[in-house]
Image: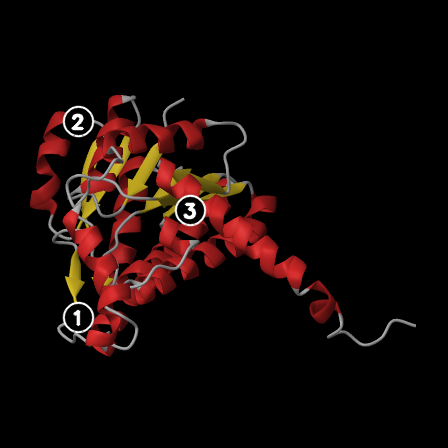
């Protein structure tokens, strides 16, 4: 049975490849972008099953209009994919407030507000799936992208809570955590702080140079990532957390080891913070 997909951020990267993948599989898709000219080729290839949706996720009126357009056209929404997002490079101390707040508006609040607008449709249906694209940087912190990490950690915690709230209503949630993929994220989709503090050159600065340096050379394939997301969503028991890329798996497992080491080493102090048990 075909599904209706609503995918944000379809101009490039994951969103574009995912839209093409789900449409090729016979589904219907609302292909969202701030500029619909950027997705007109996708619509042209699937004129009967795809619609272009103008959407800046930071604008509440466009979110409302997008959901209304999709419900009028297709009568339902089965899968929401919150993919729109940007990056930002800078040590914590170097980072500019305005740039960081704008990133939060897109990466977290935009995602949350789109989800909130779609939930009434999913609740009425008593079915649906919310897919939030986060990052391995939402599980593991890295120097030079601390505030980006913060947006994605927020998405991860939000998604876990949402999954527990909506499970009894037949609504599933998956948070996707990719590592390095050949998208525009490390290129034009991420700005640099103009502030440079020499003391951070070997940490934040070095990591930024590494990430910028392999833009376009990352091991992750966006087409394979799109297929992996579709496979997970079509499964009878989809994961809450879907890692994408070998580096994501390695990073997540290393994080588990670090957590276990700290938890075990400080177990007595941890449990000693409770009132004494009678």
Sooner in the amino-acid sequence: mark 3 or mark 2: 2
Counting from the top left corner in percent of width and height, residue 154 is at 42, 61
Residue position for label 1: 193
Depicted 48 relative to depicted 216: above or below? above
Residue in the image at 29% along x and 62% along y: 145
Are there few (<14), some (14-19), or many (20+) residues within 10 Å of tag 2? some
Residue position for label 2: 46
**SS of the residue under disc 1:** loop
Counting from the top left corner in percent of width and height, residue 218 is at 22, 39
Q: Tell me if I can see residue 269 in this picture.
A: yes
Q: Are marks 3 and 1 in contact (CB under 8 Å)?
A: no
Q: Tell me where residue 209 sits by quadrant.
A: bottom left
Q: Quadrant of the C terminus?
A: bottom right
Sooner in the amino-acid sequence: mark 2 or mark 1: 2
Residue in the image at 26% along x and 27% along y: 21
Counting from the top left corner in percent of width and height, residue 47 is at 15, 28
Which circle, 3 or 1, is nearer the viewer? 3
**SS of the residue under disc 2:** loop
In this rendering, the count of numbered labels is: 3
Are there few (<14), some (14-19), or many (20+) residues within 10 Å of tag 3? some
Q: Tell me where residue 268 sits by quadrant.
A: bottom right
Distance from disc 2 to disc 1, alpha carbons, whole Å, reads 40 Å
Between 147 and 56, the one nearer to me in the picture: 147
Which circle, 2 or 1, is nearer the viewer? 1
Counting from the top left corner in percent of width and height, residue 83 is at 29, 47
* Coloring basis for residues: secondary structure
What's the mark number on residue 214? none
Q: Tell me where residue 267 sits by quadrant.
A: bottom right
Which circle, 3 or 2, is nearer the viewer? 3
Residue in the image at 13% along x and 73% along y: 194
Are there few (<14), some (14-19), or many (20+) residues within 10 Å of tag 1? some
């Amino acid at each position: 049975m075909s599904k209706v997909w609503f995918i944000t951020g379809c101009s490039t990267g994951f969103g574009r490849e995912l839209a093409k993948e789900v449409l090729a599989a016979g589904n219907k898709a609302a292909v969202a972008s701030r500029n619909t000219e950027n997705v007109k080729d996708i619509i042209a290839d699937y004129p009967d099953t795809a619609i272009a949706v103008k959407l800046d996720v930071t604008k509440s009126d466009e979110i409302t209009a997008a959901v209304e357009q999709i419900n009028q056209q297709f009568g339902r929404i089965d899968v929401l994919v919150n993919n729109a997002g940007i990056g930002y490079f800078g040590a914590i101390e170097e980072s500019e407030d305005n740039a960081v707040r704008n990133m939060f508006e897109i990466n977290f609040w935009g995602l949350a507000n789109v989800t909130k607008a779609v939930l009434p449709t999913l609740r009425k249906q008593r079915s649906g799936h919310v897919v939030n694209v986060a990052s391995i940087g939402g599980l593991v912190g890295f120097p030079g992208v601390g505030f980006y990490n913060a947006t994605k950690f927020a998405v991860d915690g939000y998604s876990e809570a949402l999954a527990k709230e909506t499970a009894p209503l037949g609504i599933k949630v998956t948070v996707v955590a990719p590592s390095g993929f050949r998208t525009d994220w490390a290129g034009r989709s991420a700005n640099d702080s103009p502030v440079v503090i020499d003391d951070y050159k070997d940490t934040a600065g070095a990591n930024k140079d590494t990430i910028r340096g392999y833009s376009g050379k990352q091991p992750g394939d966006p087409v394979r990532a799109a297929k992996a997301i579709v496979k997970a969503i079509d499964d009878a028991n989809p994961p809450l957390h879907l890692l994408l890329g070998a580096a994501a798996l390695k990073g997540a497992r290393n994080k588990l080891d670090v957590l276990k080491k700290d938890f075990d080493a400080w177990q007595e102090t941890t449990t000693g913070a409770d009132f004494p048990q009678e």
